Image (tube, grey):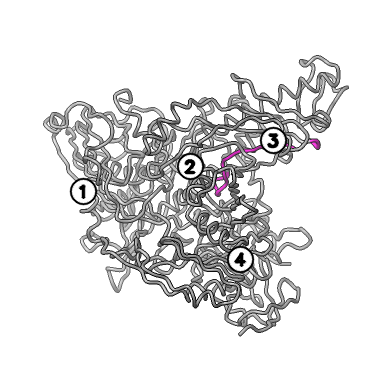
Amino acid sequence: MTDDHDDRISIEPERYELLAGPGYNFNLDRRDFIKTFGLGILFIVPTARSHAQQREQEESGRGFGNNLPQEISAWIHIDEAGKVTVLTGKVEFGQNARTSLTQAVADELHVPISSIQLVMGDTDVVPFDMGTFGSRTTPTMAPQLRRAAAAAREMLIAMAAEQLQLPSNDLRLVDARFVNHDKSKTLTLAEVARGRKLVKVIPENISITPPANWTIAGTSVTKVNAVDLVTGRHRYTSDLKRAGLLYGKIVRPATLNAVLRSANTKPAEAIPGVKVVVDGNFVGVAAPDPQTAIKAANAVVVDWQSTTQPSNAELFELLRKPASGGAGRGRGSRPQGSIADGLAAADKKLESTYTVEYIAHAPLEPRAAVAEWTGDKLTVWTGTQRPFGVRGELAEALHISEDKIRVIVPDTGSGYGGKHTGGCAIEAARLARAAGKPVKLVWTRAEEFNWAYFRPAGVIDIKSGVKADGTITAWEFYNYNSGSAGIQIKYDIPNTDIQFHQSNSPLRQGSYRGLAATANHFARECHMDELANAVKMDSLEFRLKNIKDQRLRAVLEAATKAFGWGKTKAANDRGFGLSCGFEKGSYVATCAEIAIERDAKNRKNSQVRVVRVVEAFECGAVVNPLHLKNQIEGAIVQAAGGALFEAIQFENGKILNGRFADYRLPRFGDTPAIEVVLVDRKDLPSEGAGETPIVGLAPAVGNAIFNATGLRLRSLPLTPKGIPPQARF
Amino acid sequence: MSKVTELTINGRRTSVKVEPDVPLLSVLRDYLDLTGTKYGCGEGRCGACSVMIDGQLTRSCVTPVAKAADKNITTIEGLAKDGKLTPIQEAFIKADAMQCAFCTSGMIMAASALLNRNARPSREEIVSFMNRNVCRCGVYQRIVEAIQMASNTGSAEE
């Protein structure tokens, strides 16, 4: 089936981010490198990306289409002490890229983990990178670093051989030492790097170690900086201090999209040490301490012009309308066969609509930035998934050139796709420029909810047909607004029409872990159970009948086996459900058991609890089983929020539940017993795993609720107000 | 009006001159540079700002500094002694009970408070006590495991 589809919609890193290209290519000026890194040897992987492709992408003005970023550069430096520094534009947000990339280099360079330091996301010293999103670090950056490390290893061996006056093939690099065949001659990395001023460009066509021969990758290495994290020593952006630091505070309007009519700054400016900035719609203050900043922000007298805006009640009706500017045509796969024929051939026909609400990322570290000007040069520390993208945003907003800006991303308190943009960085930089001193700005939790962006809401309409023997004959799937990630199917259906329609979103929306794959899997996998039910077939049997894809079948079989699917019936007030899917190169199958927790006094207060989840996951060769399991468990817990109760309530330009007291997040008590089954395919390249494990839970839980109560719930969240009264229990 | 407040933090006497209603969290982070304690919500709903005051687990974001005057405050920085991690800190590493780790300080403070009052908590007791702390990365199962691990190796604090 894949040949007939437009790949464009199956690869959708970030539809909602407008991604400008880098604007220039790195000029390999050796003197600059020496200045930055000092003595030693620097290995560079050159980038080979066609400018034409890049330009096309910029002009199209919308994400990547099917052009995933090819420009994946990596540098490795070895200093005079033999310390290995790896430079990458990727950033660490809790997904453990710092550890997994360290493993890749250690594995290939033959040095221990402890001698490697990763410098991540510092735009002045690392090669350009599009950003850390779309589960691309493992499939693209890790192999690139491996190539650099493998070539570096061979070049270093040649240098060591020359130093020892031995033939290269008599030397091996083992645990950061060069040794000859009888170990009579050895050299350390430091001894080879000492006194050198070398920049080596890695040749093309370097072969890297296949997963079957990995020694450090493929094992459960613990987090490389774990001690700093359990002692509170690690400095996140919000923890940074600079000499003479001021604290910023933004004056926000009471409603979204309000326009500033006037601002009287005099009362605020009368407070000692306070600087006030009014620039277009921007009103902010900087003060010597956080309390004075709050006082000053409150003292600015502002008049905002508000407009009438939509509310939850009209959301789904609104999303069905095509986006302004678009003709309302669906983007997506070319229809295959004929839906009309498929429906005519069916014994049972179904039509259902599914909806998903906006949800918030709610990263525990709110957006933060520290901005400091030195002359006309700006340095901004900020937690963003796109350091180079934010550098571009700063340049545009402040009307300065990118080469005057350095963005540094300390390891950050999570993002889940929520920290792509540079709003907070721009605000801090604007205040710092006016104040002439460094400024730290940390958004409050309320600001996070109101002024960031949300996972898109969406409506999905499905029309389908199935024969009495369980063969699916027709599949019409229209997604409005939520996105096209995960919209493609691995079910073998002769007649399909899969489309994604853009809408005008009433709220600001953007990337989210898995993005639309959650909505599309929810709708599809719930509907598959509806079809199975229509022909009285078991959920697993029905899927296996319609899926030929071996990788998908393998995870389905692994998950159901571990869960004991089909062995027992769910107890009273319990239900079993399953789902399966694929996205971003990875395959997932999820089995869930739910419990109805009755409130004897008030049936309306009865709740659904997810008590047990088994998830099988396959992402090619496993790089770090410990961290992969952790990611999958975390994704399941995060998924439980969106599945059961998370939803943004909004009305006429106001977010109504924008604080933790009102926006419920999954907690200890919501956590099911989770069993993860890893399907390790050493014969396949490693794929990313930060996102896809999140997509399976919602449909599995929806199907389990149906199993327990006979009630088919088609909206996420499923039970924001407990169990609906029509439930049969 | 600003007022000098005497504090004992991790066994050390110190003083700050701030208004008495300034949150203890801000005093720790912005005035004393003890940034291991985090701001997550400012509403006392996530536990990232958890510290101990005279052994009582406390939300420092909703605690005015005046309330902590002349009391013994313990923050995450005060747990490890001479570079030696406490059993609960060790257990968090062993169980990989963190991802972005922004909640970790608060989780470890809460877990330490729990283990101080109940050296062998049941799973239910752990879940119920820890339920006020949020980990958005969702590593709850591993945190429970870490607490169970530490409860088997010794008390949280020396």
Marks 2/1: CA–CA distance: 29 Å
| Residue A84 on the magenta segment | yes
The residue type indicated by label 1 comes to Lys
Residue at the spot of label 2: A133
Q: Nearer the viewer, residue A578 or A448?
A: A448
Q: Residue furthest right?
A: A184
Amino acid carrying label 4: it is Leu
Q: Amino acid at mark 3?
A: Asp
Residue A331 position in % (x across, y down): 27, 36
Chain bearing tag 2 is A
Give the label, 2 or 1, closer to the camera: 1
Residue toward you, A129 or A5: A129
As drawn, is A104 to the left or to the right of A428? right
Label 3 crowd (10 A; few <14 / some 14-19 / many >=20): few
Location of mark 1 (residue): A321
**Of discs 1 and 4, which sits in the foreground?**
4
Report the residue marked by disc 3.
A32
Quadrant in the rendering for residue A333: top left
Front-lying residue, B102 or B143: B102
Amino acid on which the number 2 mark rests in the picture: Phe
Q: Quadrant of the C terminus of chain B?
A: bottom right
Q: Earlier in the sequence, mark 4 or mark 3?
A: 3
Most common SS among magenta residues: loop
Q: In the rendered view, does A470 fall on the left or right side of A429?
A: left
**Label located before the other in sequence (2 or 3):** 3
Marks 4 and 3, Cα distance to the nearest angstrom? 33 Å
For disc 4, the chain is A
